[in-house]
Amino acid sequence: MIDVGLFDRLRSKRGGKQRPGTLRGASDADTAHLDAWASQRRGVEAYVEPRTNVTETTVVLVAHDGEWTRRRIGSLGQAQDFGSKRSIPVYEVERTGYPQRMRDYTKRQKILERRRREAERDA
């Protein structure tokens, strides 16, 4: 006799996805995105965010103009290796905070998005 749980059939329809509430680790796609992003911009710095109950360790890459991207990375050590191989300085957010240019960039993008929506509405 096969022991089948009541919800086994429903769980199998998830298509190989992780169970809700489990943290997804860094993937090769995350590293590839960071690598491509950094290679297309200048003055890139890395800011490592620690693991939380909700999110694995992440790294935020910030370009010279404040543009930024965030992806999962395995650990602080892996972020340091990533930066070392690409000559990118690596900082711990808990120690340094985020650069002002990142906050300024985000603020500019919000203003531009609001203007774009207003222009579409008025057209």
Image (cartoon, grey):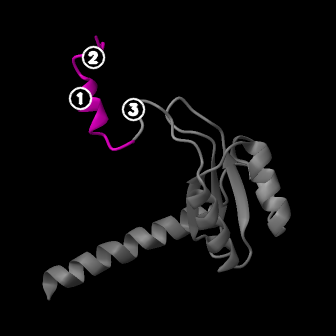
C-alpha span from label 2 to label 1: 9 Å
Dot in front, 2 or 3: 2
Q: Which residue is mark 3?
A: 19
Q: Earlier in the sequence, mark 3 or mark 1?
A: 1
Q: Which residue is mark 1?
A: 9
Q: Secondary structure at mark 3?
A: loop
Q: Residues within 10 Å of mark 1 (few under 14, many from 20)?
A: few
Q: Position of residue 113 (x, y in %)?
A: 34, 74
The span picked out in magenta is 1-16
Q: Secondary structure at mark 2?
A: loop
Q: The C terminus appears in which quarter of the rendering?
A: bottom left
In the depicted structure, whether residue 50 falls above or below residue 44? above
The residue shown at (51%, 35%) is 23
The residue shown at (23%, 29%) is 9
Q: Earlier in the sequence, mark 2 or mark 3?
A: 2
Q: Residues within 10 Å of mark 3 (few under 14, many from 20)?
A: few
Residue 117 located within the stretch drawn in magenta: no
Residue 14 located within the stretch drawn in magenta: yes
What's the residue type where badge 3 is placed? Arg
Horizontal side of 40 relative to 91 (left or right) equals left
Q: Residues within 10 Å of mark 2 (few under 14, many from 20)?
A: few
C-alpha span from label 3 to label 1: 14 Å
State yes or no: discs 2 and 1 in contact (Cβ < 8 Å). Answer: yes
